[in-house]
Amino acid sequence: MRKLTFSGGIHPDDTKSLTAHLPIEEIAPPELLYFPAQQHIGAPPEIIVDVGDSVRLGQPLTKSEAFVFAPLASSVSGTVKDIGLYLHPNGTKVPTIVIENDGLDTKAEPLNTKTLDELSPKEIIRLVREAGLVGMGGAGFPTHVKLSPPPEKVVTDIIINGAECEPYLTSDHRLMLERAKDVILGTQAVMKVFSLGTATIAIEENKPDAIAAVSEEAKKVSGIRVAVLKKKYPQGAEKQLISAITGRQVPSGGLPADIGCVVLNVGTTAEIAQVITNGTPLYRRVVTVSGNAVAEPKNQLLRIGTPFSYAFSQSGGLTEPPSKIIMGGPMMGIATCSQDVPVVKGTSGILALSEKEAPWRNESACLRCGRCTTVCPLGLVPSALTAYAKLKDLEQCEKYHIMDCMECGSCSYVCPAQRHMIQSIRWAKSELQKKRAAMKK
């Protein structure tokens, strides 16, 4: 079978052997859970519970009439103990709902009682919104918006992303292996939304057992194929995945729908199946808890709102003070400043890295070697972007297409001068976004 890939990229040690062989372990929820009210890209939420309220598992905690919005549901039954500013994994303090778990898991009314055959495309999209589904690879973009492109954007290709190219992470791998039926049912639902008879599930070659499991389930339905990808980072990035599967390129500043594609993470797809079969909103997810500072790395099924410290305790605790705690993978994840931040919808991994795994390196002057340009999967010039960012020359940053950078970290990984490229690029992108927002006012 021909293995598909894209131009550029790197081959870091994937370090997946720590957890790839370990089945998903369901973890009982803690006594207190913390729910940052906004766990999606889009409109701000309105909190619809008050301190002292009793809530049920699956009960909505937020709402909004905005289109680009994903509601948040309680992951336990219990009592609202506080609503205030608490630390988010991104390091900011945000409005957060604190719920005391009563241990009963008393469920709210199910969102759905119909089968997939009985649901119309509009009903599927409505269910996806009510369930609060977002991109579970970490982006947090509301899924129902992806399933509702403008009429002029005709979708011809559905791609389900099971690449999971980030080192350490195996949550998607285990999900595909253990819940292949959900992956296929969710894919069928997406096919029904777009009235398409075909879809592609893309998986990297380093997951042969997942490829076999999903392929076996795919044989039972028509139109779903499994594409095997070469093992390379960032193979799972949306634009690179589209290039590998279809040969088409998303234009600069464009979206996949502009070239007839829709891409969904495999975890998101499995959750679409859950809301159809069980009527449950997104209230838990598979999280890889790993790193050499973790006593017993695991793939844990955790409730949204679970503190990182609790997840570590369920993996035997930490063997040493970690050099870094990262939400997500080491390449594109977010370094957190505390273990007391909660699991959110986009938490695919919680890594506690040792000093050996994540040493601090001082940067030196650019050597003009060109390695960063060679590996950039988008064909950008990271050395120039970094230089202009350090000079605070935002005009030149724009000229060099800095907003197209997806911050994959490939440039920083190969830089012999240890330049802090991604940090500089992120700063410049943030400043440009502020500048554009101010111009709109």
Image (cartoon, grey):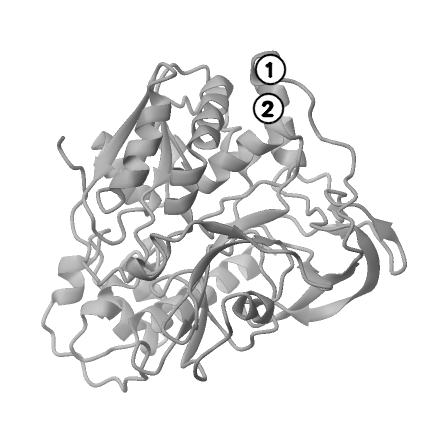
- The residue lying toward the viewer, choosing from 222 and 67, is 222
Residue 124 badge: 2
Q: Quadrant of the N terminus?
A: top left
Indicate the position of residue 185 as horizontal and vertical percent values. 48, 25
Q: Which amino acid type corresponds to the residue marked 1 in the rendered image? A: Ser
Residue displayed at 18% across by 65% down: 372
Q: Which amino acid type corresponds to the residue marked 2 in the rendered image? A: Ile
Residue 151 in view in this figure: no
**Total numbered labels:** 2
Residue 190 vs residue 123: left or right? left
Q: Are marks 2 and 1 in contact (CB under 8 Å)?
A: yes
Residue displayed at 9% across by 72% down: 369
Residue displayed at 61% across by 32% down: 275
Q: Quadrant of the C terminus?
A: bottom right
Q: CA distance from mark 2 to mark 1?
A: 6 Å
Residue 13 vs residue 125: left or right? left
Residue count near mark 1 (Cα–Cα under 10 Å), binned few <14, some 14–19, many ≥20: few
- The residue lying toward the viewer, choosing from 178 and 331, is 178
For mark 1, what is the residue?
120
